[in-house]
Each structure stands twice: as C-alpha cells, then as structure tokens.
Amino acid sequence: MNKSIKKVVIANLKMNGSLSFYDDYLKGLKNGLHDIDNIDVGLCVPYPYLAQAQSILNGSNISWGSQNIAKFENGPYTGEVSATMLNDFGVQYVIVGHSERATAYCESNENIADKFNAIKKYNMTPVLCVGENLIEREAGIMEKVVASQIEAIIKCYGVEIFSDSIIAYEPIWAIGTDMAASPEQTNHMCSYIRKLINQDELNEVKNLKIVYGGSLNSENAVQLFGLKSVDGGLIGRAAINIEEFIKICQSAQTFET
Ligand code: PGA
C-alpha cells in the first residue's frame, strides 16, 4: 500500500542551539548526508535560525522547517509567525500539534486544525503530532484519543487535506523518556491511523506519510523503520547529536523501496 513511498526523517530541534551551534550543525549535516538521495530529510529549527538554515541548506538534499505557525494570516497577534513569513524563508515542514505545545499553551484540537489548514494553504508540509498519554494508554483508549485529534481536522477541512502531509504518531509517554513504543504498539497505531484516514478505500488520500516519534534513536530506528506501516520518524533529543542523526538517516535509507 505505502511500499513505494520514500521514508522521511525529520529532526525536531526544539528550543536548542545557538548561531554557532547551527553553523556547525547545518554545515556538518549537509556534508554528512550529501550522498543520501532516496529519503527525505527535514530539520525543524527554532524560528530565529530559519534564515541560517535557508542560507546553508539551500540547494542541498535537506529541507528545513519550523516547529509552529500562527493560524492567522497577519495582524495584531503579538509573538506569532504567519505562513507567508515561513514561505519567505523557504520552509518546507511545519510541526503542528506537538504535545509540548498542546500542554504548555493549551492548544485545542480546533486550533491545531486551523494551523494545519494554514500550512496546506501556503504549500508547506504539515507534520501533525498525535498520540495518547500514559493514563489513556493504560485505559486502552489510545485509538479513541488519536481519532479525536485527527477527526477535528477532518470535520473542519475534509479528509483530502491530509494529502501531501505527514502524521507523526508520538505517544506522549514515549517523548523524552527513553521509553520508545514497541514495534507492535507502533505498528498497531500507525496502521490504525492509515485506516482511519483511508476509510474510503477507493479514494485513498494521496502521499500521506505516517511516521513514528518518541525516544527514537540509532539503536531502535532499524526496527521501527523496518515496519511497513511506518514511513519514517520524528526525532527529538537524538537529532541534537549530528553523528546520531546521520546514523538514523542511514537506517531509514536501508528501507527505501
Ligand atoms: P524525543 O522527542 O525524540 O526526544 O523523545 C521527540 C519529539 O518530541 O518530537
């Protein structure tokens, strides 16, 4: 079903780094990945470093992106960054709905839906994070939780909006904990998400990638990327170390079909 899709590996650098860190990191990665051409690689950096990412990565095989976006187009929204501003800096990927933001800034599913729409409207690729917390997993309601996150977007904008998009299954209990989901749990949830989106089997949503995130590293990448239901990964801490991130990208490359 998703056999011929190129794997995608996205780094979420979160609120880390500095001008000098990104100078070394971006140049090092560009060099370290220069011969990789059968996977997609994206780096989501903090807003202030987008210009630097654009100037160093332009023309390379690595795309760059942001970790958030405003749902509004412009106007009196202090501290926000719009889709057209991201377009100005050549942004390809935009992370939306990350649980750290949903928790710390009370982002509702409806807000996330509007942000998703803004990303698509301005021809960027959303990386929508969905996933349950530990209490929800233990209660066995992870499917219901993930379904409500995805259905909020379908309800507002229709299922077709998921074409040319990425959904990252990121169980909250696996983020930053060194407790990645098992291959069985990952396979189950990624397959569930794909089925949920493609309920109309005759009309599958085009080019939707479903990736895994949460304590992904160079040791578990091979096993998780080897799953047919998994089209790649969203990597936090392990991406801060350039050698580790390169190793993860190399694992993804192994499974390219
Ligand atoms: P982690 O973070 O890889 O450090 O667990 C993943 C994420 O939050 O996207």
Image (cartoon, helix red, strand yellow):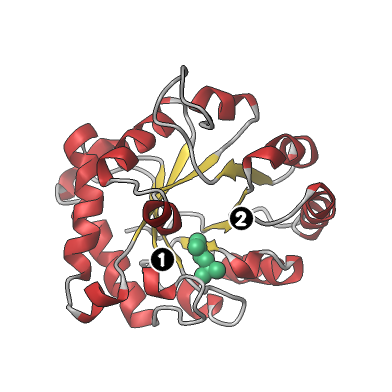
Pick whichever of labels 2 and 1 is earlier in the sequence: 2
Measured as percent of width and height from the top left, residue 50 is found at 68, 38
Residue type indicated by callout 2: Asn
Residue in front for this viewpoint, 53 or 63: 53
Disc 2 from disc 1: Cα separation: 16 Å
Query: In the picture provided, is 124 more to the left or to the right than 117?
Result: right
The answer to which image quadrant residue 153 occupies is top left
Q: Residues within 10 Å of mark 2 (few under 14, many from 20)?
A: some
Say what secondary structure mark 1 lies in. Answer: loop
Query: In the picture provided, is 245 more to the left or to the right than 158?
Result: right
| Res. 108 visible in picture | yes
Q: Is mark 2 within 8 Å of ligand 1?
A: no
Residue in front for this viewpoint, 130 or 102: 102
Say what secondary structure mark 2 lies in. Answer: loop
Q: Which residue is mark 1?
A: 230
Q: Are marks 2 and 1 in contact (CB under 8 Å)?
A: no
* Comparing labels 2 and 1, the label whose residue is closer to the camera: 1
Query: In the picture provided, is 186 more to the left or to the right than 248?
Result: left
Q: Residues within 10 Å of mark 1 (few under 14, many from 20)?
A: many
| Res. 257 visible in picture | no
Is 87 rendered above or below residue 244?
Answer: above
Q: Residue at x 47, y 40 (%)?
A: 125
The answer to which image quadrant residue 9 occupies is bottom right
Is 232 rendered above or below residue 59?
Answer: below
Q: Residue at x 40, y 44 (%)?
A: 165
Measured as percent of width and height from the top left, residue 131 is found at 32, 63
Q: Which residue is mark 2?
A: 38
Residue type indicated by callout 1: Val
Is 167 rendered above or below residue 190?
Answer: above
Q: Residue at x 21, y 41 (%)?
A: 154
